[in-house]
Image (tube, helix red, strand yellow):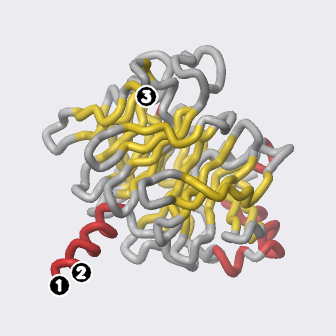
């Protein structure tokens, strides 16, 4: 069946689930990159370019605003989740496996890598997976153990915090396979997907960065839970989840209601917002990256959000 017809049939399937309230159905889903081995970690730069990880090829790709797709960095340390900080620098989780860095690093403007976190308790991390940055510049990241060939160098999977001054703290060690991680629009709550139980958890972020008041927002079991996710300005969670016929985009309200399930033609791994109006929705899936249009804008990436707060504090 031609791909255009395939997307059309998907749109018909999801309309009863509220797609007309979440996505622009006229825009459809358009492939913007292909020919990769395993795409992950989409992130949009302050200038509007899309970056994403191609893990199995050990590289990071860039999609210019013109639509041109090119290799940005290789090797990448098997980068998985990536995000831009307030200075417009790329921060990445380098995972495990062959040539994996197993650390969190920041890519400087001159191409050098600054190591932000590599060990805890004198031992290397297992395989840092995904990360997010709050309004104070603190980095939250997940470090799950998925079994061989990953190296279980830590006693358990963990969720960590890199403070603004560089100190690394273990926040959680009771999740089986913490994976996707994202902050609420106000920065007061942290969402973490546990791929060990297929549950989406929410925590309240305390003043010092500790996590409290855990709540299960949504249980995907027996299906595959969220891999990577992002939030819109209303606090709805957009996650890549599911497997086989169900794999695709899931949108969950902060109260735990399924607002949308849109199946995709490839195994879906992660999502992020971008575009000049913040409504472009990029989804990484196996060998490709797809673009959709949301009706709500996403949370601004840290570079733009933090600069805005700095200007407000200065009275500009």
The answer to whether one can see residue 65 in this image is: no
Dividing the picture into quadrants, the one containing residue 29 is bottom right
Q: Nearer the viewer, mark 3 or mark 2?
A: 2
Specify the quadrant that holds the C terminus.
bottom left
Question: Residue 293: where, in percent of width, then height?
Answer: 55, 71
Residues at discs 3 and 2 in contact (Cβ within 8 Å): no
Marks 3 and 2, how far apart at CA:
38 Å
Marks 1 and 3, how far apart at CA:
42 Å
Residues at discs 1 and 2 in contact (Cβ within 8 Å): yes
The answer to whether one can see residue 302 in this image is: yes
Question: Residue 68: where, in percent of width, then height?
Answer: 34, 52
Q: Which residue is mark 1?
A: 315
The answer to whether 251 appears left or right of 132 in the picture is: right
Give residue 122's mark: none
The answer to whether 118 appears left or right of 175 in the picture is: left
- Outermost residue, right side: 222
Q: Which residue is mark 2?
A: 312
Q: Residue at x 79, y 42 (%)?
A: 244
Question: Residue 265: where, in percent of width, then height?
Answer: 70, 49
- Pick whichever, 5 or 154, lies toward us: 154
Q: Is residue 122 above or below residue 46?
A: above
- Outermost residue, bottom side: 315
Q: Earlier in the sequence, mark 3 or mark 2?
A: 3
Q: Which residue is mark 3?
A: 78
Q: Residue at x 39, y 48 (%)?
A: 139
Dividing the picture into quadrants, the one containing residue 91 is top left
């Amino acid at each position: 069946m031609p791909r255009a017809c395939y997307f059309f049939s998907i749109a018909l399937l999801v309309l009863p689930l509220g797609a007309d309230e979440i996505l622009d159905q006229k825009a459809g889903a358009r492939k913007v990159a292909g020919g990769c081995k395993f795409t992950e970690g989409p992130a949009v730069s302050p200038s509007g370019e899309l970056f994403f990880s191609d893990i199995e090829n050990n590289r990071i790709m860039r999609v210019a605003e013109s639509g041109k797709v090119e290799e940005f960095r290789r090797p990448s340390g098997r980068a998985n989740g990536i995000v831009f900080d307030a200075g417009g620098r790329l921060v990445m989780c380098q995972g495990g496996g062959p040539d994996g860095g197993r650390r969190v690093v920041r890519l400087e403007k001159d191409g050098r890598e600054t190591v932000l976190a590599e060990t805890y308790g004198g031992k290397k991390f297992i395989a840092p997976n995904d990360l997010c940055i709050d309004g104070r510049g603190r980095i939250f990241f997940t470090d799950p153990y998925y079994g061989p060939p990953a190296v279980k160098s830590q006693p358990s999977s963990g969720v960590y915090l890199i403070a603004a001054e560089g100190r690394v703290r273990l926040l959680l060690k009771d999740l089986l396979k913490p994976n996707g991680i994202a902050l609420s629009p106000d920065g007061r709550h942290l969402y973490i997907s546990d791929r060990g139980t297929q549950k989406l958890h929410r925590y309240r972020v305390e003043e010092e960065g500790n996590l409290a008041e855990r709540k299960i927002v949504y249980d995907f079991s027996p299906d595959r839970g969220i891999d990577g996710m992002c939030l819109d300005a209303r606090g709805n969670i957009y996650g890549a989840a599911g497997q086989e016929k169900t794999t695709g985009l899931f949108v969950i309200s902060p109260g735990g209601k399924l607002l949308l399930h849109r199946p995709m033609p490839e195994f879906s791994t992660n999502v992020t917002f971008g575009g000049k109006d913040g409504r472009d929705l990029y989804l990484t899936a196996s060998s490709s990256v797809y673009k959709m249009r949301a009706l709500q804008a996403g949370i601004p990436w840290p570079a733009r959000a933090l600069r805005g707060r700095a200007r407000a504090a200065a009275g500009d």
